Image: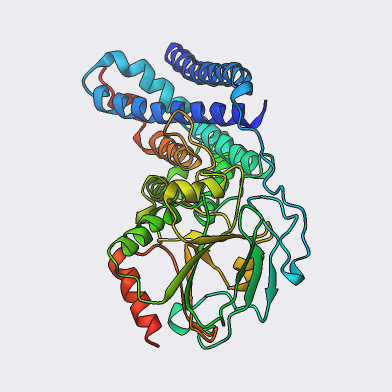
Amino acid sequence: MNIEKKNSNTVRLVVAAVVVAIVVAFVVAVVMGDSDDDASTPSADVSTSTVVDSDDGVDEGSTAGENQPVVVVGDVLEPLTDPAGDSAVGRSAPTLEGARFDGSSFVIDPADGTDRLVVFLAHWCPHCNAEIPVLLEWQAMGMIPAGLEIVAVSTAVADDRPNFPPSEWLIEMGWTWDAMADSAEMTAATAYGVTGYPFMVITGPDGVVKGRTSGEKGLEALDAWVTETLGR
Amino acid sequence: MDVQSMELFSSLLAIVAAGGVIVVLTVRVLGSRFGAVRPVAEGLHGAALWLAWLVAAVATAGSLYFSEVADYVPCRLCWFQRICMYPLAGILLVAAIRRDRNVRWYALPLAAAGLGVSTYHYVIEWKPSLGDGACSVGPSCTDIWFRELGFVTLAFMAMAGFASVLALLFVTPKPESVAP
């Protein structure tokens, strides 16, 4: 009986210790939570741009913003589900009529006679953060194929995630090429069948999709993929 | 309590759980040599099932809070961890009421699988390159909703929860194995 009582007491002691730990954690969280109220991240207005009818490509009056309206001209591409058998290869890529972060008009016309690499980036994505330096190194080493134009589309913008705003993020990362701001609804990304970030699409001078890929690539893999894809 | 306070509170609980694993392991290692730890061993042994249930229940409630109240969208790995943790809350409650220590064999696959997935999730949070190489269009498993105290994330909390359940069910020494 005494042993059972002793065991019961020790069990109660253990349970009491756990309860005390929980209460202390709660008090600490409440106290520190109150004191951190001023330091909380303010929710930023992600999109400050006014809705602009971009059917006529007019950019006057457009305001700056991390999201910009995008109009898709042409058929959207299916999401990339099978890299080995991409159904979008050989199809015409849609034209994206949008704007840069500063609100100036920016049109990505795949059929303008230029080989183009469109890079879809999300500011918060660690793989995008790793890929941009690879692209810059690719450029610095003079490995970009002649005539290949590179553009970025900033998409999946979220003001509560790292590296917001993307407009400043791209500058800080040293992005040297042009960049379009996707809409809050990810219109451009959806039109090109984006299934992950970073996402790259190569189109030929006639606007036909030559290849798409999702995910981070090292320098050699990037160069190999671009070279092989352009050669198709 | 606002979301930020809840993040800190749950992070502290995770640290307590992780500390509990260390305590259990220490008692197990020292128990055979030092009789002074016998009361702690007895207490742990007697309360192990209820403590294991408490960990699973709090982890379940916490994950639901962060998804349903704080609107943190679970990624694929989060869902696998939920699949492992949520049933534990139920079966450990029944086991605690029935004082059935054999529940550990039923809980083992769930807790072990959950520990493996949460550990992998925690690793790729720090080293995204070890993941699948891309952020998903939906919620990304390399995306970190918060990192309290420099290291506590949702994946860490799950890891601590699964580890403490396993420790309580398997490592807690029987009093008779502890030195008198």
Name the residue nearer the viewer: A107 or A8. Answer: A107
Query: Considering only vertical position in the picture, is B109 above or below A185?
Result: above
Which residue is depicted at the point 44% across and 57% down? A176
Query: Which residue is at the front of the view, B77 or A20?
Result: B77
Q: In this view, does B7 lie above or below A115?
A: above
Furthest residue in direction top, as rendered: A2
Q: Position of residue A56 (x, y in %)?
A: 76, 71
Q: Quadrant of residue B3?
A: top right
Residue beneath the point at 63% across and 76% down: A95
Q: Toward the viewer: B18 or B139? A: B139
Instruction: State the image quarter where residue A215 is shown.
Output: bottom left
Residue B174 visible in the displayed image:
no
Q: Position of residue B143 (x, y in %)?
A: 50, 48
Numbered circles on residues, count: 0
On the image, the x and y values in percent for residue A66 come to: 63, 51
Q: Which quadrant does the C terminus of chain A fall into?
A: bottom left
